[in-house]
Structure formats: structure tokens, C-alpha cells
């Protein structure tokens, strides 16, 4: 059978030959017609007619006056195109013509048959060095709005399901490919008083018909830096008309990468709803590029954010927010909205893996005062231009040199007041809560601090603070209240008022020995505490209460007690000299029916951590 199939068949060969000759003739005829039409076109088509039609087409598209200063050029190979040099689009006003755009060279393709009939239809536009001038008035409208074909299509377009648009057939016309080389757009925004210029634009936009989808890309320069934008929309006419329309864009540059995919409305009041994604590998470079100074961002190197964005009027909502700055990650929801003051309000809830509390307060211009430079000028902070109502949580929160775990906090800044609350946190095996309150942005008129620590490990606390001298070991609790009426950045120790309450026990006071103190007090009129620092004093309870004012702490009560003895102190501790001025009494308890020895009273002076002890009364002779 195979031999039969492979055997030459004269009839089959003749049929194949006829088919090939027919195809060749069709191709030859089509090629001849194509070449003949290109060769005859210059004699059949009037260049002035094509020029006039092109000029009318641009005027119909824009709805404005169009003038052509140069001599048009026609080409018919490899496709018919017309090129018009020095095109100007202008708008007539009572004050005279206002130039809206200039194009060094505008070219477009057209069909030969339509041109021969005297009705050329243009497509696939190419603009070389176009310069577009846009004025946006206080209501958000732009001066390019007109009665042209594009404006009529924008007004007539209606939304369809599946993110499409519907356009009357009489307005639906073909556009094709639009290419731009070395373009410039200048926007004068009277609503904000700012001017924007985008130059170096090289774009490629595909828009087959007005009723269809648009897709394109553009390379451009923003503020002297190269960038690229890829964009598309299935409802471009709705977007151009300021109505809600589908849109997607990707922005790429060395300092910022961003994308949006959703529904948008660009004018007069913008609306956005969709997924956003933005990241920067170099935050300082991005802020420099934008010409923006954001307090508290000095330590930021990289940042990224993904969210579901919704805006309506002046409200902006970020849901399913995922944020990363350096190595810190956060998630939650944030809302930006108007407030009763001139500053916008940020509210929401954020859950963070880690948080630097001092850096956070620094962003609000609440840095701790620099005591070495009391004449320092207050730097601006977020509170100068934002109101806040934020709930925060953090797995770990650093308040150097301490680390808080499981912190729940809030920030409320409205009107002329601001509060930062730590509602709960784990702190050195205990718990910590805090409240910081002030008036005016940046605490211009003072501050009020409340801090409460419960059952913390005092040994770790002293070690982290790098304290010297006798230190208590064991669980302890502290309540601290401080206030100042001066601006917080100018506050010094003499400006602070408040109180301290501290309790601890059971535990030990390391670096002191009461037996050695008694012995040395019976032998000398004064000695250093370090000479009696080899032991420790056990205590069942340790209490301390003090008041702060005029640059010193006044000790109302400092008492250490155990079953054998009690040590009490009162006096003053000046902050400026790190000195001590305390009177103390060491009293022993009776043992096994024997009377207690007389108490030892002594004075503690000098400076911490090695003050001088001077006995006031000597113990009994039997104790010497």
C-alpha cells in the first residue's frame, strides 16, 4: 500500500501545479495593485485637501482652533502618511487666543481610497516634541474642555457591566496607535497654587476605537529623574470625564515603585478604590525627589505598603494595610479625613512587630529635652500638620535601654492637646502603663507624665540603667508623676515638678552591710559607704516616697525593714550636683527578750554612688 501511495500520480501533480499558479497570480495581482496605488496616489490625491482635512480633523478632535505654520509633506511608501510641521492648538477667549499646545511635527496615516474620494480618515498618530499647557481652575476643571469630538464622546459615554463603556455609534471613531517623542506637559494648578512640569515624554498608546479599551506606556522625567508608567483602562472616556472608571497603572523609578488597580475618578473631586502597592528602596532619595520633609523619617531607609484604598471626597481609607519600614512590619487600617481644625486627621489601628517609642515620639516633635543645649530651636513634627487618633499594638516596643513586650497603646492629638497612653505592657517580668499629655503641637506649653510599674525585676532594672552603688534586688513597683510648664524641648531638671512612690520586697539591698556600718560608726566620725559595701541587707519591705521641685528631690520617706532592723532616711537630693543631704536612722528590733540597742543616727552627704557617712550619735559602749 505504501508503494502505491508513494508512486507518482500525474493527475495529482497537475492539480497541485494549478493551485500554485492560481495563488501566485492572486499574489502578483495584489502586489501590482498595491504598487500601482502607491505610484498613482501622488497624482490622484491633493496634498492641500489632505492638509485641510488633517487640520479640520485636529480641530474637530480638540474643539479648538488649529493652525499649521509649515509646509505639509505626503508620503505613500510603505504606507500613506501626512506630516504637518509646527502645529498650534489655541483657545479663543475674551482676552485673546490662549495657546493650549504646540507640536513640532504631527503625522498620521490615512486610507488611499478615502483620500481619493476626498474624505481622508486618519489614524496612527505620531507627535514629535509636543508641548501641552494645562490650566486647572479652583473647581478642578481644565481648560482643554471643549465642544470637540473627544469631549462629545466623553460626555456621551456610559458605563457597562464588566468594566466596559458604551458610546453612540455616531461618535465612535478609530484612533489606532498614538506615539509621542520628547513631549512636555506643563500644569498650572490654581486649586493648589502649584505648577508641575513633566518632560522627556516618550509614549506609546494603543486605542483602537473611542468605545474600546486604552493601553499604553510612557517614559518620562519627573523633577529631573527618569521614570516609566504603564497604564490601561477599559473605561478611558469615563476617566477623562471625571467619572468613575476602571484604571490600572504601574509606576517605576529608582526611588519609587507603585501600582494601582481599581476604580478611579480624577476630577473635579478625585475618587479611588482598589489595590495599591508602593515601595521605595531609598527613602531619603524619595523624599529629596519629592521635595518633602517628613519629621521622624530620618532613620528610614526602605519602606513598602500594600492596601485596599478607598477615597471619597476628602476621606481616604486604607484597609488590609500591610506596611514595612526598614525591618519593622505593621498591619491594620488607617483613615485620613478632615477635622475641625485646618489639619487633616489620621485615625485607625496598627499592629506592629517592633516599635521604637522614642523614635515615635520624636516624629511628633516630642524628643526628650537636650539639657546640653537649652537654646535649641524646636524642630517641626507631625503634630504641626496632622491630628491623630491611633490605636497601636506591638509585639516588642523599645524604650531604650528597655524592651516592652505585648504593648497596647494609643495616640490622640486633637485641637491643642495630645496624649500618648501605654494601656498595658510586659516590662522586666512585671507590667508597665504610662500616660503622656501635653498642650499645643509639640507640647509648647508643657507636659504631664504618669508612669506605673508593677512587680518588675529590680535587679534587671538597675543593670539596664547602669546604676552604681547599693541597689535593691527583687520585685518592685513604682508610681511616677512629673509635669513641666515649659516647652518640653526647653525643660531642664529645675523645671520639673512631681512625685515618686516606690515599694519593693521581699529582696536584698546589695552593696551595703549594716553591721559594718555600726562598727565603723563606733570607730570614726565619718567614713565612705564603699568601706561597708561588702555585704547585703535583706528586707521584707522597701518604701520610698519623694517630691520633685526646683531641681531637687525631697525624700519624704525612705524605709527598709526586716525582722531584725529598720533603716529610714529623709532629706534632699539635688539633681545638678548628684549630691546627697540625708539624715538616717538604723534601729534594731529586740531579740529573745533582750532590749534593742539604741538606734544609730547618721548623716549621709557627698555624692552618689559613694557618699560619706557621718554618725550623729554613737552606739552604746557594748556595741563598740
Image (spheres, rainbow, N blue to C red):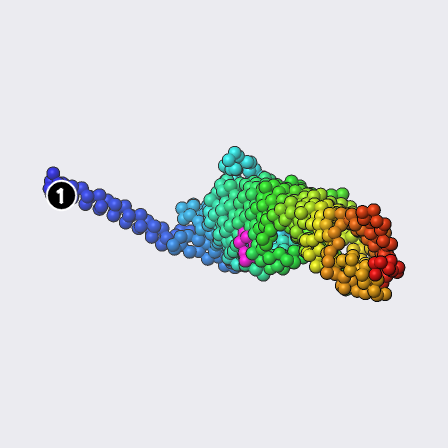
Residue 251 at x, y = what percent? 54, 51
In which quadrant is the N terminus drawn? top left
Residue that appears at 80% across and 55% down: 487
Q: Position of residue 263 (x, y in %)?
A: 57, 41
**Left or right: residue 276 compared with residue 107:** right
Residue 484's spot in the image, x, y percent?
82, 53
Name the residue at 82% across, 52% down. Answer: 588
Work out whether residue 242 can be spotted: no
Looking at this view, is 292 or 391 the one in front? 391
Q: Is residue 305 left or right of residue 566?
A: left
Q: Which residue is mark 1?
A: 6
Q: Residue at x 83, y 64 (%)?
A: 523
Horizontal arrangement in the rendering, residue 459 relative to residue 324 (left or right)? right
Residue 606 vs 478, above or below: the answer is below
Q: How many marks?
A: 1
Numbered range of the magenta stretch? 251-257
Residue visible at 19% across and 45% down in the picture? 17
Q: Position of residue 321 (x, y in %)?
A: 60, 44
Amino acid at each position: 500500500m505504501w508503494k502505491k501511495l508513494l508512486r507518482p500520480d500525474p493527475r495529482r501533480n497537475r492539480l497541485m501545479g494549478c493551485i500554485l499558479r492560481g495563488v501566485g497570480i492572486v499574489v502578483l495581482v495584489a502586489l501590482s495593485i498595491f504598487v500601482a496605488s502607491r505610484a498613482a496616489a501622488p497624482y490622484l490625491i491633493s496634498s492641500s485637501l489632505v492638509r485641510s482635512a488633517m487640520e479640520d480633523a485636529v480641530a474637530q478632535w480638540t474643539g479648538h482652533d488649529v493652525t499649521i505654520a509649515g509646509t505639509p509633506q505626503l508620503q505613500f511608501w510603505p504606507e500613506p502618511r501626512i506630516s504637518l510641521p509646527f502645529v498650534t492648538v489655541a483657545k479663543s477667549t475674551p482676552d485673546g487666543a490662549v495657546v493650549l499646545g504646540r507640536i513640532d511635527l504631527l503625522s498620521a496615516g490615512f486610507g488611499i481610497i478615502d483620500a481619493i474620494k476626498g474624505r481622508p480618515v486618519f489614524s496612527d498618530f505620531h507627535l514629535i516634541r509636543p508641548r501641552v499647557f494645562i490650566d486647572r481652575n479652583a473647581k478642578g476643571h481644565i481648560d482643554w474642555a471643549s465642544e470637540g469630538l473627544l469631549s462629545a464622546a466623553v460626555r456621551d459615554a456610559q458605563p457597562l457591566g464588566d468594566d466596559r463603556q458604551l458610546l453612540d455609534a455616531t461618535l465612535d471613531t478609530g484612533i489606532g496607535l498614538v506615539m509621542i517623542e520628547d513631549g512636555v506637559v506643563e500644569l498650572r494648578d490654581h486649586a493648589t497654587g502649584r505648577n508641575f512640569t513633566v518632560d522627556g515624554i516618550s509614549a506609546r498608546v494603543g486605542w483602537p476605537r473611542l468605545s474600546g479599551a486604552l493601553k499604553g506606556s510612557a517614559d518620562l522625567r519627573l523633577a529631573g529623574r527618569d521614570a516609566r508608567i504603564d497604564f490601561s483602562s477599559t473605561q478611558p472616556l469615563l476617566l477623562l470625564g471625571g467619572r468613575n472608571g476602571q484604571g490600572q497603572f504601574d509606576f517605576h523609578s529608582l526611588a519609587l515603585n507603585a501600582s494601582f488597580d481599581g476604580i478611579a475618578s480624577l476630577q473635579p473631586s478625585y475618587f479611588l478604590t482598589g489595590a495599591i502597592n508602593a515601595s521605595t528602596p531609598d527613602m531619603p532619595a524619595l523624599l529629596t525627589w519629592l521635595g518633602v520633609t517628613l519629621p521622624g523619617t530620618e532613620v528610614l531607609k526602605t519602606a513598602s505598603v500594600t492596601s485596599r484604598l478607598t477615597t471619597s471626597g476628602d476621606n481616604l481609607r486604607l484597609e488590609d494595610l500591610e506596611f514595612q519600614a526598614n525591618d519593622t512590619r505593621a498591619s491594620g487600617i488607617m483613615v485620613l479625613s478632615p477635622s475641625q481644625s485646618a489639619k487633616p486627621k489620621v485615625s485607625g489601628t496598627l499592629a506592629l512587630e517592633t516599635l521604637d517609642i522614642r523614635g515615635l515620639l520624636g516624629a511628633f516633635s516630642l524628643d526628650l529635652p537636650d539639657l546640653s543645649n537649652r537654646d535649641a530651636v524646636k524642630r517641626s513634627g507631625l503634630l504641626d500638620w496632622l491630628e491623630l487618633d491611633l490605636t497601636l499594638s506591638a509585639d516588642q516596643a523599645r524604650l531604650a535601654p528597655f524592651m516592652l513586650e505585648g504593648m497596647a497603646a494609643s495616640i490622640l492629638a486633637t485641637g491643642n492637646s495630645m496624649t500618648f497612653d501605654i494601656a498595658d505592657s510586659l516590662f522586666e517580668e512585671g507590667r508597665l502603663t504610662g500616660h503622656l499629655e501635653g498642650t499645643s503641637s509639640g507640647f509648647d506649653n508643657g507636659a504631664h507624665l504618669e508612669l506605673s510599674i508593677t512587680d518588675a525585676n529590680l535587679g534587671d532594672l538597675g543593670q539596664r540603667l547602669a546604676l552604681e552603688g547599693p541597689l535593691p534586688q527583687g520585685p518592685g513597683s513604682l508610681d511616677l508623676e512629673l509635669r513641666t510648664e515649659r516647652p518640653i524641648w526647653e525643660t531642664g531638671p529645675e523645671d520639673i515638678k512631681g512625685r515618686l512612690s516606690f515599694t519593693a520586697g521581699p529582696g536584698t539591698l546589695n552593696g551595703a552591710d549594716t553591721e559594718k556600718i555600726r562598727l565603723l560608726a563606733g570607730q570614726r566620725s565619718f567614713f565612705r559607704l564603699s568601706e561597708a559595701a561588702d555585704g547585703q541587707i535583706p528586707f521584707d519591705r522597701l518604701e520610698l516616697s519623694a517630691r520633685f521641685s526646683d531641681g531637687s528631690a525631697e525624700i519624704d520617706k525612705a524605709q527598709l525593714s526586716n525582722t531584725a532592723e529598720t533603716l529610714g532616711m529623709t532629706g534632699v537630693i539635688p539633681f545638678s550636683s548628684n549630691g546627697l543631704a540625708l539624715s538616717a536612722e538604723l534601729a534594731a528590733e529586740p531579740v529573745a527578750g533582750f532590749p534593742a540597742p539604741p538606734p544609730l543616727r547618721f548623716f549621709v552627704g557627698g555624692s552618689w554612688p559613694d557618699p560619706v557617712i557621718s554618725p550623729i550619735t554613737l552606739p552604746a559602749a557594748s556595741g563598740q
